[in-house]
Amino acid sequence: MSNLLKHILDGQNQFASGGLLLMLIGSIGVFLRALPEHLWNWLVSQSTIVVTVKDDDEAFTWVKEWFLEQEFLRRIRKVDLDTSLRGAEVALIPAPGTHWFMRGRRPYQVSFYRSEDTKGRSQRRVESLALKTIGRDQKIIKEFVDEVVACQHRKRRTSSYLYLFDDGWDSVAAYSPRLIESVLLRPGEKEHLIQDIERFRSARGRYQRLGVPHHRGYLFYGPPGTGKTSLVSAIGAKFGMSIYVINLAEMNDRTLKNAMNWVPENSVILFEDIDCMKTPTRRLEINAERAYQEGDVRTSVVARSMDQAGVSLSGLLNVLDGFSAPENVIYVMTTNDVEAIDPALLRAGRIDYKLFLGPACESQKVALYRRFFPEASEWDATEFAQAHWADTMAEFQGLLLALEEEFSLSELV
């Protein structure tokens, strides 16, 4: 090899020598031209700090909600329409690309990326945000993160959202919470329930002083169509608490624990139709315990079988009042058949307040009639309620909707 290089450089092969010289000169030229860019990129990387958030993290939505409160958003000229933040109300957020703004006499660059993930069977849009500013101290970014978190806490104190679990909590964009005024219970029931929740929410300090976990369980039971789910929605709206719906039929102990770990404080955790939960059979539990004690290779197989079988009673009790139980939350269980619920779920500390929602009484029907027809007299409402049979408020509401539609059509004619 050395002889070959010497042969080339000695000029014995002028063609190869000239080509090598041109290649060396070209490489040096390319390096020199790229040197300023490399130097600039190095200086930028050493003098700036960047925080990135991806759309598979809940913080991505938090940052977008923070943008909606910022004055500089009005000056951005490239925006996207977004209905995932405020339901039917359209919000304007920064469009994909690079945007600049000033915050606290410091320039910030926001880069919004959007791409298509084609690795799976179906394409999925992937989005991320990168926030860059001058400085090297993470305290700068920490201040920004604190603002984002504070914004989210303000929204949660005043707004109610609905979340469903599917490998993570996803908000329901079209959710519209019920107003507490629209929920009509028997005389005194709604007022007593609200007072109980208010006492619980104001007693956190006392719970901590006594060493008692700060959570409270409610059971709403009764026939279908009596307004159990509507009452939960109205409670969330009344107290600015978001609702996290747990579907035990689609979970196992592991996914249930994971879901509960990510429920924030000041939330309502709703277990709908708790009597329909599919628990693993006792035989599976015994086999799993025996295999574990014996170190049997079947342990993993049995464990997978239990995972597929559903949520066990012990797994549910653990997230209600065990080490996995979240703090400062309200549990609400609904059921059509209270007799089908395991008594262990109903003891104090798990269920602290029971409310039966039964057939519609006359006072409820009269109040609902006057909500539909505010100009109607008490006598008219009572006469209609007595003349039209309806077992539940849902059925009576259906009658009123049909009647209101007839009145609307007659007015058009």
Image (spheres, rainbow, N blue to C red):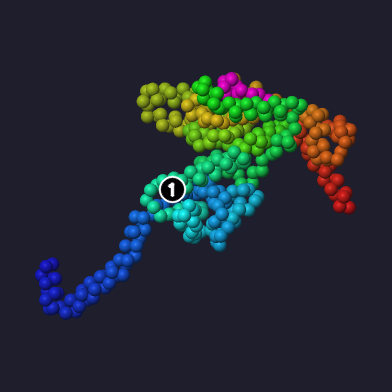
Residue at which label 1 appears: 141
Q: Residue 220: give x, y in percent of width and height.
A: 66, 28
Q: Per the image, is 349 magenta? A: yes
Q: Relative to 118, is 407 above or below?
A: above
Residue at 65% x, 22% y is: 339
Which quadrant of the figure contains the N terminus? bottom left
Give the residue at the far front of this rendering. 105
Q: Residue 376: give x, y in percent of width and height.
A: 86, 38
Q: Residue 399: give x, y in percent of width and height.
A: 81, 38
Left or right relative to 227: residue 96: left
Residue at 53% x, 58% y is: 95
The one nearer the camera, 268 or 246, is 268
Residue at 83% x, 40% y is: 373
The one nearer the camera, 239 or 83, is 239
The one nearer the camera, 272 or 321, is 321
Answer whether residue 112 is visible to the viewer in this image.
no
Instruction: Give neighbour class at mark 1: few <14, some 14-19, many 20+ (Cα, 10 Å).
Output: some
Left or right relative to 291: residue 62: right
The span picked out in magenta is: 344-355
Q: Residue 314: give x, y in percent of width and height.
A: 51, 24
Left or right relative to 33: residue 85: right
Q: Looking at the picture, which amino acid does disc 1 mark?
A: Ile
Q: Per the image, is 384 magenta? A: no
Element under disc 1 = helix
Answer whether residue 137 is visible to the viewer in this image.
yes
